[in-house]
Amino acid sequence: MNHLLFLNLGAGEIIIIALIVLLLFGGKKIPELMKGIGKGVKSFKEGLNEIETEIKKDVNTDEKKDAAK
């Protein structure tokens, strides 16, 4: 049972999906699509890191205010 964790897709289903994508977009467009997806994921991760940094900064500021009281 060779299943991937993502949507329980097996090797056969992955190959069929890859062939359909190749037929729809052609070989020249696929690298452009993957580059766009990669940029989107990178941007998303940067956004999450910025939010995490802001939350930590706010928590540290609140702790300093509480300690000063």
Image (spheres, rainbow, N blue to C red):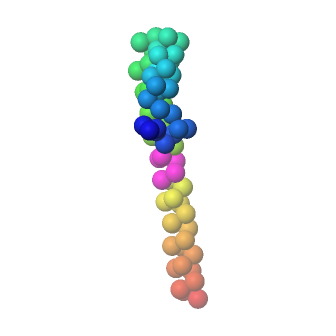
What x and y, as percent, mark residue 56? 51, 66
Q: Is residue 3 visible in the rendered structure shown here?
A: yes
Say which residue appears at 46% left-offset and 25% top-offset.
12
For the point 48% across and 53% down, which residue is it? 49
Judged by its main secondary structure, the magenta piece is helix
Q: Position of residue 46 (x, y in %)?
A: 47, 47
Position in image of residue 45 (x %, y %): 48, 46
Q: Nearer the viewer, residue 25 or 36?
A: 25
Residue 47 covered by magenta stretch: yes
Quadrant location of the N terminus? top left
Residue at figure coordinates x 45%, y 22% from the top left:
15
Q: Is residue 16 magenta?
A: no
Residue 17 higher or lower than 47, as above or below:
above
Q: Name above or below for residue 57 compared with residue 62.
A: above
Residue stretch rendered in magenta on the structure: 45-49
Count of marks placed on residues = 0
Look at the image and tell me in which quarter the C terminus lies: bottom right
Q: Name the residue furthest front.
A: 1
Q: Is residue 36 visible?
A: no
Up/down of 32 relative to 46, above or below: above
Residue found at x 51% / y 34%: 9
